[in-house]
Amino acid sequence: MPELKIVVCMKVVPKPEEVGVDTETMRLDRENARSEMNPPDMNALEMALDFKDRYGGSVDILSMGPPFFSDILPVGLAMGANHIYLLSDRGFGGADTLATTYTLAQGIRKIGDVDLIFCGEESSDGATGQVPPGIAEWLNINQITMVNRLDYDAKRKMVRGQREIPGGHQIVDTPLPSVISVATASNEPRFMDYRIKPSAFEDDRITTWAAKDMDVDPGLIGEPGSPTIVSGLDQAPSRERRMEFIGGTPEDIALKLAEILEDRL
Amino acid sequence: MSDKVIDEIELPADETRVLMTDPPQSETVELEALVLDDELWDQLIELTGGAAAPCYQCGVCTATCPWGTVREEPLSVRTMMRQAQLGLFDGNEDLWLCTACKQCEVYCPRGVPIADVFRALRQLAWERQQVLEGLPNVLWSVYWNNNPLFQPPSQRTAWADNGQLHDFDPAEHEFLLYVGCTASYDRRAQNVARSVVKLLNASGVKYGTLGEGEPCCGEAVLSMGHSPYFEELAAKATSIFQEQKVKKMVVISPHCYDVFQNHYGELKDTVEIYHYTQLLAELVESGRLELGASPELKATFHDPCLLGRGNNEYEAPRKVIGAIPSIELVEMEHTGIDSLCCGGGGGRMWMETEAGERFSDLRVQEAVDIGAEVVVTACPSCIACLEDSAKAQGLKDLRVLDVAELAVLGQDGALVEAAND
Amino acid sequence: MARMALLWKRLMTENVKSLFGVDDEAKAIWVFLEQMGGSLEGVGLELLAQGRRMADDVGWQVVALLLGDQIGHLAKEAIAYGADEVWLAEHSLLKDYTVDAYGGVVCDALMKGKPSVFLAGATPNGRDLLGRLAVRMRAGLTADCTDLRLIADTGVVISEVTGFGGGILALIEAPTHRPQMSTVRPGVFPLGEPDASRGGHVIDFQALLSEDMLQTEVVETVVGAGVDLTQVEALVIGGRGIDGNFDMLRELADALGGDIGATRPPVDDGYIKRERQIGQTGVVCRPKVAIVCGVSGAFHFVVGIQDADTVIAINTDPEAPMFEFADYCIVGDAAEIVPALTRALTLERVLSA
């Protein structure tokens, strides 16, 4: 049986609580924010590694971002992935999801013969959730989104995913190749294996591709490839707990709470 | 048994009869599981420096283990030792029951460092990905957030009242105050940190902290058995202390204190490490800190395992309590080297202990039995467990306080006097 | 200034172009009406109401796009809620949502109708569909929007979105690409009043589908099974203070379409199963709303819901630490407040039904 070739799309993000907005310049202030691996991508990697444990194959990490991503992505290798492909180029910068998914799709094409692509459901910064279906569309392959469980039928070369829907779940079958977006917190990512961690941070474990190394249309990457633009930025109302006391009779309180709940749900 | 005897026995015609020469049923089943694993044995020797070898299966450890007080069938520490010796890996739940209280070590006639052996077995569990659910998340929290409590690193100093803390400067400060993750983030433990700060200020000790840059000591990681990651954390923390030219360190949690003293290699050779009760004891003895009149209270001291049995420090906290007039100090039934563990060690603050199996339930009862109004202790985990138990048992009149909190209780007036002397 | 510079830069490069442009657009707001098992999802109706408001400001049309199998009866409902037109595509292969079937049909419809704006609820299916379609049409897509504004003189939609865990608000637009697509967070826009007398017409849109076009198969749909508190949006949590009265909490949870959880003491006392324990040694979750009743607020519990969007705490003790971690604090007896709240919510539901 030919080996399953799996790619996991991962992204390094700033810790959300450390990002602010400079209201004068209307720019994001993430200079001093600590970085971490996008938490849903860790769930995606865990699902991929578990898949590899159960069915065999190889797991590579694909990422689009600036060079400093190479300081953090090797965490995934220490968890058990084989290799990192980092797509890094000034020309990729300023991309919205259309351009990002195009670039990632071209990266997957360059890796070649990929059977399964796992992505986190969304990223903690933009939180669009648009990358997994976008990649599937560019590659013209199948997709199952919001998956919390995945099984493989080698004979039929299909995957069966359990997909979360409000109030329950669906079981969906689709043939390979396919994109799978993994539901946030749907598993517990394994901690790094310290027997392999030292080798994870060595240079030969990452391949970096610039635009010139890839087959990309300059009009589809970065800013030129992005229909959407950000025309305003603001700090959201404080995340500190309000600690607002509500008084009155139980009925008064109930009415006020009902209003708040209608608003929040 | 000779064949002749067997021939004379009238055996039932029943097909399920078991001949006397057949081995007992249970052994037949176990023989299949008893596969000796040389590789595992070698790993265990290496990991523990041969620590399990001296065990001669006397069973004193099982007899002294506090799990025997809450379970019908106690945790068989002896069986764990045997499995370790034979190189077997069970990977079952019992492996995670050990609270590293060291009650067994105190009585082991062969001096086996039993807690170390449990940790070594846990390390193997990590390698085989057979750890309890929830533990990998704790390690990831340490990795991304520099604390095992899922709290944002940017909030590490939020506990301190504004302007109270100064960044450590070796030229100005005698001590580094190492706050630790629990005292920094756990609301209840934050009060201990604030109390320690008050007392240090009152005594005129010059100290500073590392603020957001304070590295997690890694005790949770060590207790859960991930030694390689712990070593990495220890190396990082040590180099930070070295860079900052720390010569003396005062530590709030005995968990942090224990790893710095016993698992950080040569750190203790270059840095004088104090548990804060030891520093307070010195300050009280030298008269730099006077603890004024307090409400009359009958108190008992619960020795945290990592301070008492773990580091042989039973005196310092009692000296501090003793220096507070009108506190009557009484001892519980299990005291000194026999002090009953609260159940929070060995990483168990991140594992669920079923109701009815909590050592701290028994401990608070011991406090009530000797008529104590306050249980005093010197560890944030002990406080959490004991308070929880007091509440669950409906012991409304039993208070749980940290030594520092007791000292500060109703002392503000007296402390200001001491500072002005 | 920065925006102008960006637009200028774009004009200078050969940029990606959408399949149809501003010049070809119909002045219409299209709303994808998601349906499951023959009932319309609420968010679709919310979007019809918002679409109606936006369209009325500028004299545009509102069109509902409805796909399914034997769901023609829903067209009337769509018109009552604000649609001028309903494009209805019925086919047996549209019975269950798959992007294989829906993607092609919706794309065909959009290419035929060429609306300026296309909206859908940010539901799992809505995001699954629009994420793919936006690429197919090379259009701009904003996700999980919390507000939409249609600028009268430019016909540009400005979407408000949150990012970075809700800490940042951004305004996003896609001025030169069509359709302007958005998925919208369910519950942000109020439902309008349905008006059965509203006029509108139904256009039967032919779905060109065949079996071999579908690779994905929905094998099974299960609703209401199992306990997974991490996926619940409204969590009602009971502590020691509710004295085991989880039935009362269950009624409130049902009224909110949520579930119940507990702190350690009631689990210890056997009132509720361990799998519902929230906290450091239990489940850690991030519901939209957590209503915490009779809980003192020990740190080990709070860790379990600290990332909830809104926390409401009810406790008889005014000094309860739980209040420090709550947005709305009620000093009172949960045994009185919770049933009153359940009544208020149920009444609200009955009145607006």
Image (cartoon, rainbow, N blue to C red):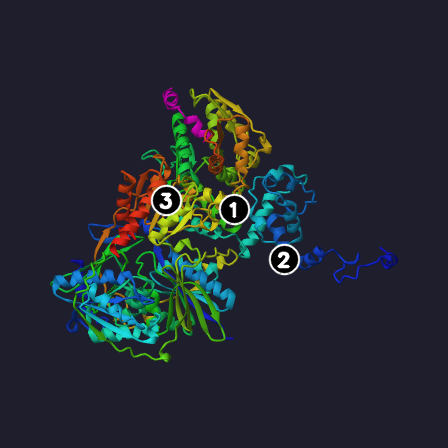
Which kind of residue does numbered mark 2 sit on?
Glu
Q: SS at mark 3? A: strand
Q: Nearer the viewer, residue A117 or C112?
A: C112
Give the percent coordinates (x, y) of residue B389: 49, 36
Which kind of residue does numbered mark 1 sit on?
Leu
Q: Which mark is residue B39?
A: 2
Q: Which mark is residue C292?
A: 3
Quadrant containing the C terminus of chain B in the rendered view: top left
Q: Nearer the viewer, residue A94 or A124?
A: A124
Image: C129 above or below B327? below
Query: Viewer-nearest of labels 3 and 1?
Result: 3
Q: Nearer the viewer, residue B197 or A40?
A: A40
Q: Is residue A15 visible?
A: no
> Disc 1 marks which residue?
B222
Same chain for the residues under marks 2 and 1 in the image? yes
Q: Which region of the structure is painted magenta?
A: B401-421
Q: Nearer the viewer, residue C213 or B105?
A: C213
Query: Viewer-nearest of labels 3 and 2?
Result: 3
For label 1, count other residues whose C-alpha is less than 10 Å away and answer few (under 14), some (14-19) or many (20+).
Answer: many
Give the percent coordinates (x, y) of residue C209: 32, 79
Q: Is residue C3 visible?
A: yes
Which chain is indicated by disc 3?
C
Image: C318 above or below C145? above
Give the percent coordinates (x, y) of residue C112: 21, 76
Which kind of residue does numbered mark 3 sit on?
Val
Whether the residues at callouts 2 and 1 have beta carbons within 8 Å, the answer is: no
Which chain is indicated by disc 1?
B
